[in-house]
């Protein structure tokens, strides 16, 4: 119900970088999803309204179009739905939805962009959601040495990288969860990082399902562009990729 158009994506890009979507008019989507920081923010935990610290690491938006649910715990079923969560969250952008729409309507220059994207100048919440989601679906990583290798270029990976790929697929069992071209199975797993009894305790997907098997389960993140998106894990407590590998080892 939200087909792609170049005009809609451009409108979404303008909204994505516009701090007027927040209550303070100081925080845009790009504050936590900075293109220069792998569409994350480079911090362990994101900061939002009034410099308050959130509970989770800001996920990268690279290849977000290929996920089946959104947020670390999967509580958004579409990118259009996901748009409404950080904007309303008191710790993030702290904007009631009617205020968000009012802030956009205050900017006279937006009318022409909405008309190009949707056929008339009407500014609605649904259109804001659709434009932002359309822009985010276009944030796709470039092909890598791995892609050239699996496409038949046998010398694309050096010996160390080939050894890593072999371990990834066999003894290390990384591919059990990080599979498909996305390097994610789009499922939720408990990797022992509930941090039970600490200030950062987080039960993840369990808060959504109430099913005991989902305690501490989080969505498998894609490994594409992973070197750009640290620090890692839902709590951002791992400053290097070696820390991540050591945990699973």
Image (cartoon, rainbow, N blue to C red):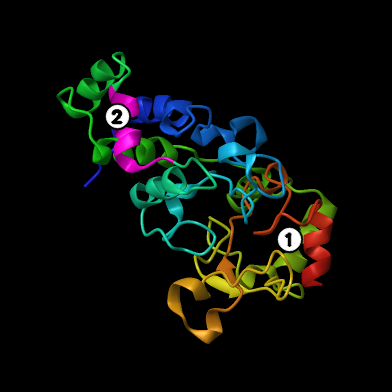
Chain-order first, disc 1 or disc 2: 2
Residue 149 visible at all? yes
Is there CB contact under 8 Å for labels 1 and 2? no
Residue 216 versus residue 144 in the image, above or below: below
Counting from the top left corner in percent of width and height, residue 183 is at 58, 59
* Secondary structure of the residue carrying numbered label 2: helix
Q: Is residue 103 magenta?
A: yes
Residue occupying image coordinates x 24% and y 16%: 112
Boundaries of the magenta span: 95-105
**CA–CA distance in space, label 1 to label 2:** 51 Å
How many residues crowd mark 1 within 10 Å: few (<14), some (14–19), many (20+)?
A: some
How many residues crowd mark 2 within 10 Å: few (<14), some (14–19), many (20+)?
A: some
> Which labelled disc corresponds to residue 102?
2
Residue occupying image coordinates x 23% and y 35%: 124
* Secondary structure of the residue carrying numbered label 1: helix
Q: In which quarter of the image is residue 9?
A: top left
Query: Is most of the magenta stretch helix, strand or loop?
Result: helix
Counting from the top left corner in percent of width and height, residue 129 is at 32, 41
Residue 243 versus residue 155 in the image, above or below: below
Total numbered labels placed on residues in the image: 2
> Which labelled disc corresponds to residue 165?
1
Counting from the top left corner in percent of width and height, residue 57 is at 64, 52
State the residue lying farthest toward the top.
109
User: Which sits in the foreground, 226 or 166?
Assistant: 226
Q: Does the magenta stretch include residue 96?
A: yes
**Which is more foreground, mark 1 or mark 2?**
2
User: Which sits in the foreground, 28 or 103?
Assistant: 103
User: Which sits in the foreground, 10 or 56?
Assistant: 56
């Amino acid at each position: 119900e939200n087909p792609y158009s170049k005009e809609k994506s451009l409108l979404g890009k303008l909204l994505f970088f516009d701090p007027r979507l927040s209550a303070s008019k100081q925080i845009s989507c790009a504050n936590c999803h900075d293109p220069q920081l792998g569409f994350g923010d480079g911090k362990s935990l994101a900061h939002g309204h009034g410099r308050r610290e959130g509970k989770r690491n800001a996920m990268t938006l690279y290849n977000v179009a290929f996920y089946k649910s959104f947020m670390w715990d999967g509580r958004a079923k579409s990118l259009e739905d996901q748009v409404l969560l950080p904007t309303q969250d008191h710790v993030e952008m702290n904007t009631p939805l009617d205020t968000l729409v009012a802030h956009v309507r205050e900017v006279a220059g937006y009318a022409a962009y909405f008309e190009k994207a949707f056929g008339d100048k009407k500014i609605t919440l649904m259109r804001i959601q659709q434009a932002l989601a359309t822009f985010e679906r276009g944030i796709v990583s470039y092909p890598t040495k791995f892609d050239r290798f699996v496409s038949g270029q046998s010398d694309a990976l050096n010996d160390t990288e080939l050894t890593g790929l072999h371990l990834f697929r066999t003894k290390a069992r990384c591919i059990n969860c990080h599979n498909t071209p996305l390097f994610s199975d789009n499922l939720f797993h408990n990797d022992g990082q509930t941090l039970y009894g600490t200030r950062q305790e987080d039960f993840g997907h369990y808060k959504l399902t109430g099913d005991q098997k989902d305690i501490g389960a989080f969505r498998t993140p894609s490994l594409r562009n992973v070197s750009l998106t640290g620090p890692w894990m839902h709590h951002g407590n791992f400053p290097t990729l070696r820390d991540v590998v050591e945990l699973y080892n």
